[in-house]
Image (cartoon, rainbow, N blue to C red):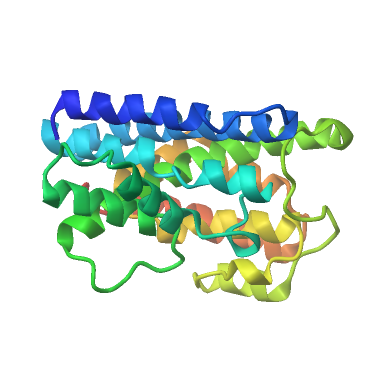
């Protein structure tokens, strides 16, 4: 992908997202948050591709995927007032459908178009399809890593804001702030299993899910980035201070250190 083609995707993103703002302050606050997230994911992607030593065309393709990855989030929130796919619609599938309907990818090669649509469609999947070829899998894994890096930043900023004044919190709160956590969710974290979003019951469960994302990261620079910013340590600080949580904290932080040091730059 050329730089000019990447600029055209940026222009589409500006125009497309602008269509969805309206007179609803709650909707607008959540949409603006997602616009900012998309740009930051593009920034994280730029940081990652530099460390993975991608060439210019590959880097542009990765950055194009990053800015478009949450295309489906904008009509999703306007229509359903939630970003929870389980209570609304699969935003990845919707995003790919929108990009095809808008003909925004017509100027790039058929192969690049396939890679972008695949990455947008599957970036939020619990498990990636086994049928993805090497390039589709690589670029999908790349945007998944960049996405998680910024989601960590977003959820931590939201947690700080929520703790200061829950009544004035301006964004969607998907789960109740009740005590404890689900044994099944904690067990999946300890065994490095995939946590099913449908079993989450409260904010602590959601935090455990987000911590478990480290077991679904793909590239050494991603782990080092997580470690540098202290995301996981802060997320653990919002959980109950008991023996199980302290043990899990040690295990997860040890894993991040090991994975960041041992995994190859390109996997």
31 in relation to 216, above or below: above
Residue 219 shows in the view: no
Residue depicted at 52% across the width and 45% down the height: 73
31 in relation to 190, above or below: above
Which part of the image, by quadrant, shows the N terminus? top left
Residue depicted at 70% across the width and 45% down the height: 237
Residue depicted at 64% across the width and 35% down the height: 30
Count of marks, rendered view: 0
**263 relative position to 41: left or right:** left
Residue depicted at 58% across the width and 71% down the height: 196
**27 relative position to 20: left or right:** right
The residue at the far right in this view is: 167
Give residue 265's position: percent from left, percent from top. 22, 47
Give residue 220's position: percent from left, percent from top. 31, 47
Q: Quadrant of residue 259?
A: bottom left
Comparing 182 with 35, the one in front is: 35
Comparing 44 with 249, the one in front is: 44
Which part of the image, by quadrant, shows the C terminus? bottom left
Comparing 254 with 33, the one in front is: 33
53 in relation to 176, above or below: above
Give residue 231's position: percent from left, percent from top. 55, 41
Q: Quadrant of residue 136?
A: bottom left
Q: Quadrant of residue 180?
A: bottom right
Residue 3 shows in the view: yes
**114 relative position to 91: left or right:** left
Give residue 27's position: percent from left, percent from top. 68, 35
């Amino acid at each position: 992908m050329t730089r000019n083609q990447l600029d055209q995707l940026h222009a589409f993103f500006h125009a497309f997202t602008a269509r969805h703002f309206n007179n609803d302050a709650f909707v607008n606050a959540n949409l603006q948050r997602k616009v900012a997230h998309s740009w930051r994911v593009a920034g994280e992607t730029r940081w990652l591709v530099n460390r993975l030593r991608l060439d210019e065309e590959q880097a542009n393709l990765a950055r194009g995927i990053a800015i478009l990855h949450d295309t489906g989030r904008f009509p999703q929130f306007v229509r359903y007032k939630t970003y929870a796919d389980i209570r609304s619609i699969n935003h990845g599938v919707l995003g790919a459908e929108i990009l095809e309907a808008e003909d925004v990818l017509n100027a790039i090669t058929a192969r690049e178009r396939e890679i972008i649509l695949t990455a947008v469609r599957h970036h939020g999947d619990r498990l990636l399809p086994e049928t993805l070829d090497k390039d589709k899998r690589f670029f999908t894994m790349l945007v998944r890593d960049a996405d998680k890096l910024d989601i960590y930043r977003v959820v931590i900023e939201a947690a700080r804001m929520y703790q200061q004044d829950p009544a004035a919190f301006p964004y969607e709160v998907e789960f109740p702030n009740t005590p404890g956590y689900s044994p099944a969710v904690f067990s999946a974290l300890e065994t490095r299993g995939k946590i099913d979003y449908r079993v989450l019951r409260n904010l602590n469960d959601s935090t455990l899910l987000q911590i478990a994302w480290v077991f679904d990261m793909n590239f050494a620079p991603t782990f080092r980035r997580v470690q540098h910013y202290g995301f996981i340590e802060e997320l653990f600080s919002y959980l109950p201070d008991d023996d199980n949580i302290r043990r899990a904290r040690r295990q997860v932080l040890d894993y991040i250190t090991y994975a960041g040091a041992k995994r190859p730059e390109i996997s």
